[in-house]
């Protein structure tokens, strides 16, 4: 079948009140907390997965390797309609 046409001018049926009038963003954390976070995240590239190390597996993957692979899998298993690249509408509240 031919690909479905996606119109950007039509209103989105799954728009919610939260999407129309979002609350103000939370206050930013102190910059020292962000720096600490980024330093920890940077260590994930070299920190080997404990289960692999405990089982003496040669060339264990890093935590960052695992996180990257899981994010790619989630990307492809997401609730996106490949014909339109539009997200599947969330369920409506009862």
Image (cartoon, grey):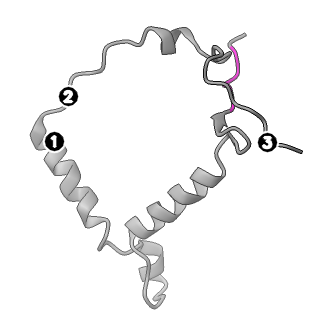
Left or right side of 43 for 63: right
Q: Nearer the viewer, mark 1 or mark 3?
A: 3
Give the labeled residue for mark 3. 3
Mark 2 Cα-neighbour bin, 10 Å: few <14, some 14–19, many ≥20:
few
Magenta stretch: dominant SS?
loop
Give the labeled residue for mark 1. 33
Vertical placement of residue 32 versus 19, above or below:
below
**Labelled disc at residue 28:** 2
- Sequence order check, earlier mark of 1 and 3: 3
Percent of width and height locating residue 31: 11, 38
- Sequence order check, earlier mark of 2 and 3: 3
Percent of width and height locating residue 62: 39, 73
The secondary structure type at the circle numbered 1 is helix
Percent of width and height locating residue 91: 70, 22
Q: Image quadrant for the N terminus?
A: top right
The secondary structure type at the circle numbered 2 is loop
Q: Nearer the viewer, mark 1 or mark 2?
A: 2
The secondary structure type at the circle numbered 3 is loop
Mark 1 Cα-neighbour bin, 10 Å: few <14, some 14–19, many ≥20:
few
Vertical placement of residue 48 versus 80, above or below:
below
Which residues make up the magenta segment? Answer: 88-92
């Amino acid at each position: 079948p031919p690909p479905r046409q996606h119109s950007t001018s039509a209103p989105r049926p799954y728009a919610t009140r939260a999407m129309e009038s979002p609350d103000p963003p939370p206050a930013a954390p102190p910059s020292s907390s962000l720096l600490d976070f980024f330093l920890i995240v940077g260590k994930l590239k070299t920190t080997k997965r404990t289960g692999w190390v405990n089982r003496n597996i040669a060339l264990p993957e890093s935590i960052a390797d695992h996180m990257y692979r899981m994010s790619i899998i989630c990307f492809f298993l997401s609730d996106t309609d490949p014909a339109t690249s539009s997200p599947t509408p969330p369920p409506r509240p009862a």
